[in-house]
Every structure is written in structure tokens, then in C-alpha cells.
Amino acid sequence: MSFMIRGTGMYVPEKIVTNDDLSILVETNDEWIQKRVGIKERHIAVTETTSEMGYRAAQAALDNAGLQADALDLILCATVSGDTVSPSLACMVQNKLGADCMAYDINAACSAFLFLLETAEGYFARGKCKNILVVGAERMSRIVDWSDRGTCVIFGDGAGAAVLTKADAPYDSVFTVHGGDSVIKIPTYPGKSPFWQGDVSEKPYVYMNGQETFKYAVTAIANDVHTLLDNNGLTMDDIRYIVPHQANYRIIDSAAKRGGIPLEKFYLNIERFGNTSSASIPMALDEMNRAGLLTRGDRLILCAFGGGLANAACLITW
Ligand code: UT7
């Protein structure tokens, strides 16, 4: 027993920041950002908190599913840019929705939405839940160094959510973790302990070796998609869409070439939102759902990569 996606939702802040707007802050330009990353604009929070965005996406997903909050058995959330370490984002979303089910967060950076699906699938398989809400919400603008042009132009803010309902639908997944902090790292506040004698120089911003991440991501996507196809006796023709983590248009283009996958199979919206980390895949799913691109029974492959390092892909049935 696994699940079907019964409803989706998303929320992005109203404020749109263009590449030209960023060129006032750091030495960059529209041409570089569009050519190297594929982003034209991103939404940036002005007053919207991570939990507010997560709640709004979650409520939209519940409305789309035609369910009330009391129908939820579990809420799983992901964020690397939460308002608080405790309560978790899931506890805040649960409270704002007026739900009373179990709720907790999973930390797996940009791949986290797929970790939420995998965890949810386990609850369905054990017969523990009928409806599970999964949410990725990020205010990346809070944790980027706005003087570092290598990172601040890439990210955006937003939230995406899905309501999963128990169903007898084919599901498979592949997860890989190469632990360590040498390629991507988001340090926390070092604190002011009078006893601490370790490093306090690190600022709580995103550090990323862009080129290493790029190479890693291309290989991960191509390998993960083929692993899922091979393990399930499928070909690319059996897959309606691949929904990737939206980090860089060139990553997807290179992965498509490397894996011999038609670029048209990938759903891309990075142009309008930038990289919203754990929110990017559920936001894409919501856009696809509302645009009527998906038909019940369609097979989709969702794939993600990022901090951890962690990469994953899930084969789901719409
Ligand atoms: O979601 C989490 C995972 N993250 C990712 O997937 C990100 C993966 N990495 C990337 O998307 C790309 O590596 C970046 C977009 C971050 C950078 O693109 P790149 O093509 O790898 O650029 P680069 O770091 O090799 O830099 C090339 C040049 C450098 O100048 P020099 O040394 O050649 O003179 C940079 O200083 O581009 C310069 N540069 C910029 N120029 C204008 C770096 N950032 C900018 C910028 N505007 N914003």
C-alpha cells in the first residue's frame, strides 16, 4: 500500500526581485544569471515567515484535496530556513491549520521533499495513516549572504505542499547520502558560550562549492532516473514527466544529455522562482496540477540533490 497525491498547494511572497534588481546589490547582470543558471526572477519575503508560507501552501493543498485539517493523520515538513529550531515547522503548520495530528520535520536540505514522501510511504505501508500532509517551505533570503554573488542570485522564497492519500499505487525510490560538509554547508549561529573555545568565525549563511555541486547533481539525476527505470522494467516512454529540484537550468540540460533523456520530459519553472530548496518540487507539482498537465495514472519521476550531500528520486503514480 502506498499513496496518491490528492491535492497540492503553493505560496510565494508577493515581492518579485528581478536580475536587474540584484545587479544593484552585487556585481552581476541579467545576462550572466539567465545564461549560467536560467533564472529571470524570484519571489522574496518582505514580511512572510517560513511558517506562514508553509501554512498557506498547506491550506491550499487541503482545499485542493477537498479535505479539512481534521482529516490529517500526520504532518511532515521540511525546511533549512525555518523561523525557529523549535517548535518545528510542522508543529507551527499544524497549529495554524487547527489540526491535532502528529507533526514533525525532516532535515535533508534540497532533497528533503523526497525524504518526506519516503517516510509517508512507510506510514501508509504499515497501515498507520489515511491522509498525510507534506510541506516544504523556505525563506532562503534569510540565510544567503547578500554580498556573495555566487549564492544570493540563485535562491528564492516559497512553499509547496501536497496531501497524500492511501492508495494501491506503484511507488519506488532510490536514496543516496554522501555525508560531509565540504561541498554545501549552512552553519548555525555559533552562540556566545563563555566556555566555548572552538571556531566562532563562521556566519550562518549558505556556503556552496557551486562547480562541485553542479557535477555531482548532473551525475545523480542521470543515474537515479535510470536506476528507477531499470528496477521497474520501464522505459522513458512510460514516464509522463520528470520533476526535478529546480537549482539550475544547465544542470537539468546536462543531466538530460548525460542520461539520454529528452529535455522535454523535465518540468522546469526555475526561470520564475529560482532555487527554493525543499519547496521546489511541491511547487512544481502544484503548478502542473493546476495547469491540468497531469492525468490520474501518469507515472512521474521526482528527483532531487543538494546538501548532505544527498540525492534521491521517487517514482510515483499521479
Ligand atoms: O540546491 C542546492 C544545490 N545547489 C546547486 O545545485 C547549485 C549548483 N551550482 C551552480 O548552479 C553553478 O555552479 C553556479 C550557478 C552556482 C555558478 O555557475 P558556474 O558556471 O559554476 O560559475 P563559476 O562559479 O565557475 O564562476 C564563473 C565566473 C567566476 O568569475 P571568474 O573567476 O571566471 O572571473 C565567478 O566569479 O562567474 C563569476 N560569477 C558571477 N558573475 C556574475 C559568479 N557568480 C556570478 C554572478 N554574476 N552572480
Image: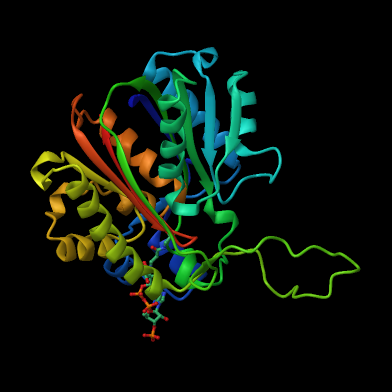
In the rendered image, the quadrant that contains the N terminus is: top left
In terms of depth relative to the viewer, which is nearer, 211 or 101? Answer: 101
> Residue 229: percent from the left, percent from the top?
18, 47
Residue 41: in sight, yes or no? yes
Q: Residue at x 28, y 65 (%)?
A: 218
Tell me where residue 188 sits by quadrant.
Answer: bottom right
> Residue 118: percent from the left, percent from the top?
42, 39
- Left or right of 238? Residue 296 is right
Up/down of 109 relative to 63, above or below: below
In the rendered image, the quadrant that contains the C terminus is: top left
Up/down of 301 relative to 165, above or below: below
Q: Residue at x 13, y 43 (%)?
A: 234
> Residue 40: percent from the left, percent from the top?
33, 57
In terms of depth relative to the viewer, which is nearer, 72 or 62? Answer: 72
Up/down of 155 relative to 88, above or below: below
Q: Residue at x 59, y 21 (%)?
A: 101
Tell me where residue 199 sits by quadrant.
Answer: bottom right
Quarter containing ligand 1? bottom left
Residue occupying the far right of the picture: 194
